[in-house]
Image (tube, coloured by chain):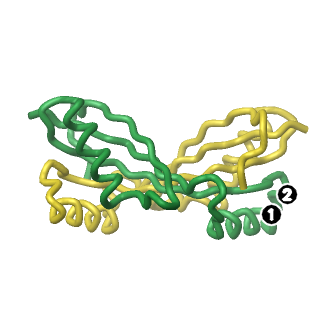
Chain colours: A yellow, B green
Amino acid sequence: MQTFKAKIQIRLKSGILDPQGQTIAHALQSLGFSEVQAVRTGKLMELQLQAENRKAAEDVVKRACEKLLANPVTEEYHFEIAEAEEDVTV
Amino acid sequence: MQTFKAKIQIRLKSGILDPQGQTIAHALQSLGFSEVQAVRTGKLMELQLQAENRKAAEDVVKRACEKLLANPVTEEYHFEIAEAEEDVTV
């Protein structure tokens, strides 16, 4: 078994309204950041997991995204997997 | 003026407890993902902004992170800037 680290990025699909992003954009504008035109927010997750090999790790992360981490109706995800030389700080 | 797109990743500093990540790790484990050992969560923000050049855009994003987007006590951020050929879908 090897230890892998997966970096998952979860974003709202384009066309899905992002009220949190709009609020942040307005907050930035009222703080004087008039250059900022729009903000979209998303989530970042780093998983540390054990798997036989990279293919198996990818499979686990894909299933985890589809089952729990991302909402397939409104969100899209992508991830990168790396072998972890050392443990993620937890 | 050019349009730039900044991708900002905001993470908890190592050593800072992440109860949300722990909850997700437990949820995954009770769904049968026993391979998952730990989860750390973070935030993803995509800013669309106008600036004279890349250097000016970097400066705006850095100030925005320090003033509003990230909590310098508990969080660390890093970002990438790209010229936007087309508008970000908002």
Q: Residue at x 28, y 54 (%)?
A: A39
Q: In the drawing, does residue A58 fall left or right of residue B87?
A: right
Q: Are marks 2 and 1 in contact (CB under 8 Å)?
A: yes
Residue type, numbered disc 2 = Ser
Question: Which residue is the site of mark 1?
Answer: B29
What x and y, as percent, mark residue B42? 53, 56
In this rendering, the answer to whether B62 lies above or below A68 is: above
Residue type, numbered disc 1 = Gln
Question: N-terminal of the two: label 2 or label 1?
Answer: 1
Which residue in the rendered view is the most extreme toward the right?
A1
Question: Which residue is the site of mark 2?
Answer: B34
Q: Residue at x 23, y 30 (%)?
A: B54
What x and y, as percent, mark residue B64? 28, 53
What x and y, as percent, mark residue B13? 57, 54
Q: Residue at x 8, y 34 (%)?
A: B1
Chain letter of disc 1? B
Which residue in the rendered view is the most extreme toward the left?
B1
